[in-house]
Amino acid sequence: MDRRRGALAAAAVCLLLLGGCSSLIDQPVQPVPRVAGSALVVETDDGLLQGIDHEGVRSWRGIPFAAPPLGDLRWRAPQAAAPWEGGRDATQFGADCLHPPSLASTLTSTLTSEDCLFLNVERPAEVGEDLPVLVWIHGGGFVMGSGRTEAADGEAFVRRGVLLVTLNYRLGRLGFLAHPALDPESANAGLRDQVAALEWVQDNIADFGGDPDRVTVGGGSAGGLSVNALMASPTTDGLFAQAISQSGLGREPTQTFAQATSEGRRLATAAGALDAAALRSLDAAEVMTWPLDVFAGQVPVVDGTLVTAPVAQAFAAGQEQDVPFLVGSTDLDLEADLLKPLGLDDEARALLRSAGEASLVRAYATPDAVRRHLMADAIFTEPARLLATAHGRRAPTWRYRFEVVTAEAFARVGGAPHASELPYVFDGVLPLGAQADAPGMAAVVSDYWASFVRTGDPNLVGGQTWPTAEDGALLRLTNTGAVTEAVDPWQRRLDAVRRAVEGAPKLER
């Protein structure tokens, strides 16, 4: 299990480094003069904030949206942040949440801390009030990542007339631990941080020129999984009007609260912590060594309040929020070479047995296509179709498949890797060779996403039509442009995957 967690985190590093890294500094509370008419001084419910202006984008960074989750607040639901006197310097990012020590070498330029519940606001300088808002939840397998990456790389997206909010949430076992000595809210504390940030947006975003009635919640990878869970939660009504889920799984196993509590007791007992006081006295770095496995269903947990059912079950029952939804995946979201290090090779063999290898080869055309794509389709591509089809019966839904890939990446893995659409969505720093291999596609992808945030419909005037997804249609984003598909060309193979997944035995890991 440690090996799988480490491999998942290593894969998440690739996603997080797409946007580069920024150095982080503690946020000082300083006197901020309230200058009449100053667009960079904003008054929130907690106090004044001094922001910065960079090439037409106004930014406020390191804003505490909840109290530091330290001491007695560790493993509790997020509490209100304390107001400050005078003003607060909001020109620097706050600390990232703690990551597993094994990832320290990738994060040497950042400050991490258990005191990490900060968010960032970016808005265009020249556009007026009542801006549409995108609240972005970062990925990283629930063990790493922060809101600073998209904040630092999202200026081109913001200039499309969107206010962008990015946030941190508690990671690893500091964010997701059930134990008999703790309140049940500890099982999904990291998700509750996301809810607290959305509540902060509702209370404060109008002060920055945002429209609280036009909030889109979006995320990729673990962030997309979070969006799916928030859509299915009975506690998030009114916090967002639209949703975007990129490579957010959808059929993942989900632990019951009893299962999660048993696992948490085992971890804590091995560390010598038998009660709440002992747990809260543990060194935070030690807690971050405890494994957390997304693919084994250890996050999120069906805790009975925030998460009441697995996502696929909630969507099938029509229990998710009926908001416009944009959902999809890349065409190779999980590389075949990662299956063994992630501990997924047994699942792959189970799928082969369930469907019959010969049947899968007929659906995929070649044995190599089965080897390369089966688990990517089973974990990401087919579940995106499942959620899109289910939700499309309740609210406008659009599905995409991102197939833009550099020649180097295609030669190496055979498709667009996990989360590779992210820099295209934000029109940010692209991989080397991207402009030559897919000229102009960053602008195309970003325009579609910005249109969805602004209007609730991704379709662009003069652009390729993007049909809604209830009948299986989608938009393929390719190196040569956007392609409308009334019938998914992968329909036969995804149908075979669905039958295999539904017929395969559930494996305990």
Image: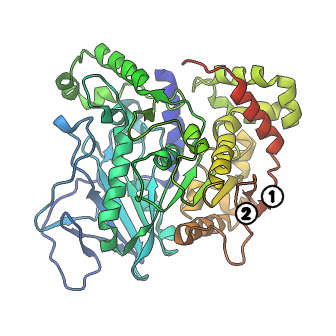
Mark 1 and 2 residues: CB-CB less than 8 Å, in contact? yes
Going from N to C along the chain, the mark reached first, 1 or 2, is: 2
Q: Amino acid at mark 1?
A: Ala
Q: Which residue is mark 1?
A: 486
Task: Provide residue 264's location: percent of width, then percent of height.
Answer: 35, 22
Residue nearest the observer in this picture, 347 or 106 = 347
Task: Provide residue 295's location: percent of width, then percent of height.
Answer: 54, 30
Residue nearest the observer in this picture, 333 or 214 = 214
- The image quadrant that residue 291 belongs to is top left
Q: Which residue is mark 2?
A: 467
Residue drawn 27% across the image and 59% down it = 63
Name the secondary structure under disc 1: loop
Is 175 located above or below residue 435 in the figure?
above
Cα–Cα span, label 1 and label 2:
7 Å
Residue drawn 39% across the image and 20% down it = 263
Residue nearest the observer in this picture, 94 or 411 = 94
